[in-house]
Image (spheres, rainbow, N blue to C red):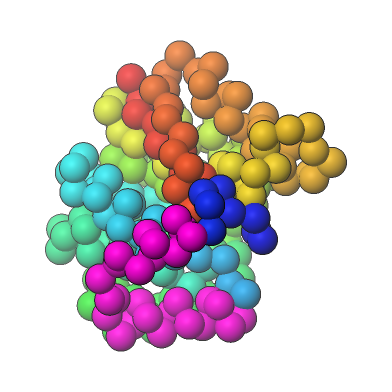
């Protein structure tokens, strides 16, 4: 999105504070910018890693992974015994992710799913410690209904882009913006979740399952 949730100079300040990433992540960031590939960016990547480390999450499912940038942050934070499930519907991005994960040294702890994220989750048995939602925004409500039963008690549901460039703050004709508005209301009305939305980059929702 073109808009900034925080004031632009503050946003830049946060990015200037970040330590340099390794060669693989830096290459992925450059590619995403050049090819307009939607990735979470390093500020959110570090936040995801922190959530994993704090919660002790080991079994993780991503609903939408693109070229695997977020997957690397999650898998590294979760450690060598992790089981992180990557999903994407685009074969080109899927194969690019395979190579990046190999080069990042985390491929053995990642399970790869090519196809629809919801269908992949249905086919994967067991409960998860953390589910990260970053797929089609118009599908966020369906993803919420599907993901919550798959989380263990105390598990985390995390969703990106929940402020959608500020579109959610007022009535909007944007289809994705309206979908996210409904998703956010569902989060806060759910008796099963304790949610918080942070104005980090494009908005990140973090929910703990009661």
- 3 is higher (above) or lower (below) than 164: below
Residue bounds of the magenta highlight: 9-35
- 142 is higher (above) or lower (below) than 60: above
Extreme residue toward the top, this view: 191
Q: Is residue 77 left or right of residue 4?
A: left
Place of residue 187 in the rendered image (x, y in percent of width and height, measured from the top left): 52, 26
Position of the C terminus, as image quadrant, is: top left
Position of the N terminus, as image quadrant, is: bottom right
Q: Is residue 188 left or right of residue 164?
A: left
What's the residue at 59%, 42% (across, down)?
Answer: 163
Place of residue 178 in the rendered image (x, y in percent of width and height, measured from the top left): 74, 37
Q: Is residue 15 magenta?
A: yes
Q: Is residue 10 left or right of residue 202?
A: left
What's the residue at 35%, 68% (across, down)?
Answer: 16
- Location of residue 70 (image quadrant): bottom left
- 8 is higher (above) or lower (below) than 200: below
């Amino acid at each position: 999105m073109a808009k900034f949730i925080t004031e632009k100079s503050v946003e830049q300040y946060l990015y200037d504070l970040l330590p340099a990433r390794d060669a693989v992540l830096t290459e992925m960031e450059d590619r995403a910018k050049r090819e307009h590939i939607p990735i979470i960016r390093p500020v959110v990547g570090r936040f995801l890693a922190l959530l994993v480390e704090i919660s002790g999450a080991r079994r993780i499912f991503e609903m939408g992974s693109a070229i695997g940038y977020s997957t690397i942050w999650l898998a590294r934070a979760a450690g060598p015994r992790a089981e992180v499930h990557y999903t994407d519907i685009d074969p080109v991005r899927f194969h690019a992710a395979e190579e990046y994960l190999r080069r990042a040294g985390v491929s053995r702890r990642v399970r790869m799913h090519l196809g629809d994220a919801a269908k992949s989750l249905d086919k994967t048995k067991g409960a998860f410690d953390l589910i990260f939602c970053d797929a089609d925004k118009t599908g966020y409500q369906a993803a919420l209904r599907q993901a919550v039963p798959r989380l263990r008690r105390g598990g985390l549901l995390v969703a990106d882009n929940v402020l959608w460039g500020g579109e959610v703050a007022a009535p909007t004709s944007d289809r994705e913006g309206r979908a996210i508005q409904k998703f956010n209301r569902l989060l806060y009305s759910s008796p099963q979740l304790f949610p918080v939305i942070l104005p980090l980059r494009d908005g990140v929702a973090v929910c703990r399952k009661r």
